[in-house]
Amino acid sequence: MTGPTGVTGATRATGTGWPPRRPLTASERRLLQMIDKGSVDDLVAQALLLAIVVWVGSPWLWVGWASRWLALSGARLARREILADRTHRALFLLAVGHGLAGVGAVVSVPEAAPLVMLVMFGDLTLAGYTDRGARRGYFALCLANAALVALVSLGDWSDVADLAPRWLYVVVLGAHGLATGTVAARIARETYTVLRDRGDRLRALAARARDADREGQLDVARALSSSTARDLARLADLVAGLRTEQDAERVRAGAADGSATAKNALARLRALSHGVFPDVLHQHGLGAALRALDHTERADPAAPGVVVVEDAGARLPADVESAFYALVVACRRARPGARLTAAIRERRGYAELLLTGDGPDGDGLEVDDETLAALTDRVDGVRGTLDVTRADGRTTVHAAAPLDVPPAAADADPQAVAILTRFISSSTLLCALGLVATSAVWAVTRLVAVGIIDAVLVVVMASVLGAGALERRGRRGAALGLLCFETAFAGIVVSAAIPAFAPTAALIVMLPLILGLPYLSRRALEAIGLAQTLMVVLVICLGVAETGLVDAALLPQWVYLSLLAPTVVAVGLLVVLALGEGRAAVDASNEHLQTALLDLLKDIDATRRGIERDLHDGAQQHLAALAIQLHVAEQLAAQVATSGTGGSRAGAEPVARQAAPTPATGVSTPWQRLGVVLERVAGQVEQAREELTLLVDGRFGETLREIGVDEALRRSAALARRPVTVTAQGADDVPAAAAMTTYFVCNEAVQNATKHAGPEASVAIDLHLVEEPDGPRLTFRVSDDGQGCDPAVLHAGRGVAELVRRVREAGGDLVATSAPGRGTALTGWVPAGPQVTAGTMVG
Amino acid sequence: MMTRMGGDLIKVLVVDDHAPFRAAVGVLCMADGGLAVVAEAASVAEALEALSADPDLVVLDVNLGGVDGVEGARQVRALRPGLPVVLCSTAAPSELPPIPDDPGVTFVPKQNLDAHVLHEWFDRCRQHPG
């Protein structure tokens, strides 16, 4: 737009195609659908109404008809605002439109007031789409609309009732009532359904996150034990060999091999711990971590990586950074060859990540549905949204998450928030006030109609008190049922007695439906919604048909107003109370769940970072130090080999015995120094192995215990390339260390069988908890029906020896048997008593 | 081959919060004969104090608790402008804060550290000071 003025990413004009326009969020799409559908319905209704207006010929009807166009224009404007990314304004426009149309409607047909007010209250339920800050203003607007409609309806302007035929009047108003009631109930129900679905989803998310975290931890534990532990075992063997070696040249070659082994092991471990949690993300933020992805995760430096074209600069909340990072890593993994472009932004209280891909075929982002679902979960976990759009052959992934820290969740169970109780006590109070007022009016006027209302109020009050008693006994369904009956009864009798009260009576009938929203199942809501809507229609028809016991015209105006105005206010209050409290209850419940989920994700991240730190501070440092020292050993051995100073003489004795008791610097010969170095290296390898075992048992043991060793083995069996069956008895609750040892040994045994038993072999794992005099033992047997081998061959390799070492460290034992043609079996046990756990951990 | 002919020992200050690495640098110097660890420190604060041992070369880990090694290098260089610093880490440079553009500071992956690297950096800094 401004031309090529050397703009940076942050100021780049949107017209250039980058960054692409933010796609609509799911809720915005839902709102648009609602507006579009409403607009179509309204156009059809306008056409029908036009025919009626022309036929009846009342100028008041023309006013009502014209005002509906204003509402339609409001909806069109709202639509434009949503598309222009100003959804927060759209709701206000819709509500203003509804207000204008509502006033127009009650000016022409005053009896429509309760229906119109239902629309206003329906608007209230859409408050979730507005900005949090604007919510109060939005509520005020909706309530002001309702109050205005109620006020206007009190002035009886229209001549429609006289001009239109009675049957037409009844039919139009009845149809209108049915349509409005259904729409209002649907909007309210959908809003609640969205809220409640969100609750279910949050619960599922937490469960999945916990599960995925456990799986991930076991993966890391498995990788550590099979890869790093093996590297260290190899180094231990190698160093032990070097210390008894007498030939300097062989020591040199061996040390060089050892140094390379340590470096390779370090590189593998670094890749592993980077996958667990990238330290750079914690230290330097999302932008830095994405840039680092370019270098660290790429085997081929020429391959394209992630280009960060725009970076908010400031740090985002840690959980958001971590979710966005996971998103980019998953997208890269989905299409390794793709070049991804990322923009990180902060906008209107949200952190945003826009990701586009440029692949060999123009599109670098192909995220399969499963990955997409997992990523949506991840972003959803931090209260964010994820959208994937495809346009012009280019895929854009857009993630947004709020920057603010959510309020601390209330400790109480939000479902127990006593909306119903509070509603019942408010109703009781209002009924009591009404009873006093109508009794006073009846005492003065002795009018039959007032007496009927007085009697109805007594019945209503009794029902409300009964509902309260039921609610206190925990019979919520029965309490709601009683309220349904009570409101329907009151509505029918009141509108039959005083037809002018019909609109208000209709509202009363809708109350239990609104009240039941947070409590009832979707099916129950649908049933009640249908029943209540029919009741509304019945009440309206009764009112319109004027089959009443009392003609409103006979009531003195002051009686009429003194009864109607407080009733409208009271019913309005109850509706708002029911809606607000219901929403608040579900909202609170969701916020509670959301905070719990955020805490869980934070915990998971903290755990992963802890593991990364442990690996960085432990095994990685050991391996780096070993690489350095083995390189030193290599150089010393080379000196000995080439210089001949003491080479041949010292070569007569193993290096180990040459170790000087005090490693003084100036006086010792290279051969003696070599002895000192190798002694230290040997000590350090042992230390590293012990620390690794402790780390694996300590960090992952509890996770394994939670899953159960048998279940964990079944899960890894599902990934094996041979059929593996797991049978277990009592193995699901053993101490962490016993579980961990068994898990690794069995996994390794399955690996060995996969490699050596032949393509036709299947593997069986048997776990049993047995009681022995010295305490419980977990016995295990891993057997295959493969080709087997000579026992001598079996024991020659390091594999079985390493397993035996691991089991004996845990205080158990292991025997391997095999014969050609008869398969291979590993049988062993580990102590599974609670007291043994501490012993092995320290040992 | 590594002993400096007629020269004094190069006095090394090792700064790392991990003992295995400090020990490894000790072994490296001991084996070389031309290098000697005169002081060890586990943090930048300790390192600044240890400068009183008058080292000729500082081996400094980047990922230190508290003040990181990059900032540490800046502080060391500010206090002793002529003192060569070798930063090291098991992490790749791309994962670390930018290494200062200072002719007296270099970066070596931890696992590749050896006597040759230290000698070379010391000699280069002496030949092209500042």
Image (cartoon, coloured by chain):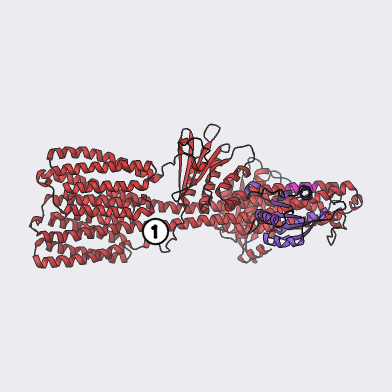
Chain colours: A red, B purple
From what the image shows, is residue A546 above or below residue A34? below
- The spot of residue A809 in percent (x, y) is 69, 59
Q: Is residue B117 left or right of residue A841?
A: right
Query: Which of the 4 quarters of the picture holds residue A135?
Result: bottom left
Q: Is residue A802 left or right of residue A603?
A: right
Q: Nearer the viewer, residue B128 or A297?
A: B128
Query: What is the magenta range?
Result: A253-261
- The spot of residue A635 in percent (x, y) is 82, 49
- Count of marks, rendered view: 1
Q: Nearer the viewer, residue A548 or A715?
A: A548
From what the image shows, is residue B68 above or below residue A312? below
Q: Nearer the viewer, residue A556 or B20?
A: A556
Please indicate, yes or no, whether residue A771 appears anywhere in the rendered image. Answer: yes
Q: Is residue A257 magenta?
A: yes
Q: Magenta: predominant secondary structure element?
A: helix
Residue positioned 53% across, 40% down in the render: A341
Q: Quadrant of the N terminus of chain A?
A: top left
- The spot of residue A680 in percent (x, y) is 78, 57
Q: Is residue A381 magenta?
A: no
- The spot of residue A252 in percent (x, y) is 82, 47
Please indicate, yes or no, whether residue A731 appears anywhere in the rendered image. Answer: no
Q: As shown in the figure, which amino acid type bears the numbered disc 1? A: Ala
Q: Quadrant of the C terminus of chain A?
A: bottom right
Q: Residues within 10 Å of mark 1 (few under 14, many from 20)?
A: some
Chain bearing tag 1 is A
Q: Secondary structure at mark 1?
A: helix
Q: Is residue A241 left or right of residue A123?
A: right
Residue, disc 1: A588
